[in-house]
Image (cartoon, rainbow, N blue to C red):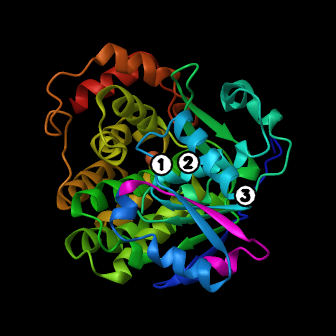
Amino acid sequence: MKSIVVWGFPTRVVFGAGAVSETGAALPGSKHALIVTDAGVKGAGLIAPVVGALEKAGIAHTIYDGVKGNPTEAHVDEGLTAYREAEADCVVAVGGGSPMDAAKVIAMRVNHHRPLADYDDATGGDRYVTEPVPPIIAVPTTAGTGSEVGRAGVVTVASTGRKTVIFHPSLLPRTAILDPALTKGLPAHITAATGYDALTHCLEALVANGDHPMCDGIAIEGIKLVRRALVRAVTRGDDLDARGDMMKAAMMGAVAFQKGLGACHSLAHPLGSQCDLHHGLANAICLPEVVRFNLEAAEARYAEVAGILGGTADAARCADDLAALREEVGLAASLKAAGLDEVPLDALADEAIEDGCHRANPRPCTRADLRGLYERVS
Ligand SMILES: [Fe+2]
């Protein structure tokens, strides 16, 4: 026994086709909800069922739909203004990772007034989150980030220009509403890329350093769900069972990565910020090479995963199984194939080594290791 560890899975999850109708019932005592979303989600008609559910519960609503990809402090300020003008008392996030991140920080801002950079988790900013945060309900419309069960909001702070993680248990949504019918209209390439992100969360969490048997069990089950459902969800978008399994896998991946992530996410984050590559696609391109790099450090785990993905529990096959699944769902196998002919290897490696995710990687990484991995996936 080397240390004391803490395990907890506190989010209430309401799952099923039509679950969105429970949104209002998840907010007992609330009178006015601020719905935080983006124009794409609104344009896809996914707000109407949320509004209907709130009305059924006697809850008024105001919509803030100004969030864009990679949300900024300006989005948070606009959302906060809408919250105050409406005299809202709760926040309902509807969409993918960006609206959910923005919604959490908007809710935090209601009673926390220091400069936003002060709340940066990297500098211990969670110590300033001391006041009540209004209830947050998360209604995801993609199956990937799992932000609906996460306690972090990521926004770019105006004064620093940096993507900043704000992390505190009170940012955790009170209830996550997982309604697979809301993901039926997602295009195949987004389904594939977001689904591969969920797979990467499960796999990196499974092999991450740390003692967390509950996360390990959830990660394994999440990988089984991806194996069963991802190809179907990509090729037959209206298959509600497959869509539901992918929503579960995404949620479980994010629960599992409480344990930590790994080198693949440290490689993927700079590809997002410097090359504007989709996060899930970046993971898909990097994951098989990261598994090859890690192989000896987590052989038993990779053998188990190879058994699930390819039917043969041989660690040496795990990377190939992952590459085969990537191909089957139509994702690019290299940066070049994704349209990035020239990548700034040194700048990417500089950012990747600063990223915290690889600290949980089962094999320690140097900057040269990460640069070498970028070269191999170029
Ligand atoms: Fe991710």
Residue 167 image offset from top left, x and y in percent: 68, 41
Residue 240 is situated, as x and y percent measured from the top left of the image, at 35, 82
Q: Which residue is mark 2?
A: 101
Quarter of the image holding residue 283? top left
Which residue is the site of mark 3? Answer: 87
User: Of callouts 3 and 1, which one flags the residue occurring earlier in the amino acid sequence?
Assistant: 3
| Residue 28 colored in magenta in the image | yes
In the rendered structure, does residue 329 fall within the stretch colored magenta? no
Does label 2 or label 3 sit earlier along the sequence?
Answer: 3
**CA–CA distance between discs 2 and 1?**
5 Å
Rounded to the nearest angstrom, the CA distance separating label 3 from label 1 is 23 Å
Please give the name of the residue rendered at 53% of the width and 43% of the height, measured from the top-left corner. Answer: 261
Please state which amino acid type lies under the numbered disc 1: Ser
Dividing the image into 4 quarters, which one contains the C terminus? top left
Q: Which residues are magenta?
A: 23-39
The answer to whether any part of residue 216 appears in the image is: yes
Q: Amino acid at mark 2?
A: Asp
* 348 left or right, relative to 359: left
Q: Residue at left 30%, top 66%?
A: 186
Where does label 1 land, which residue? Answer: 98
Q: Quadrant of residue 286?
A: top left
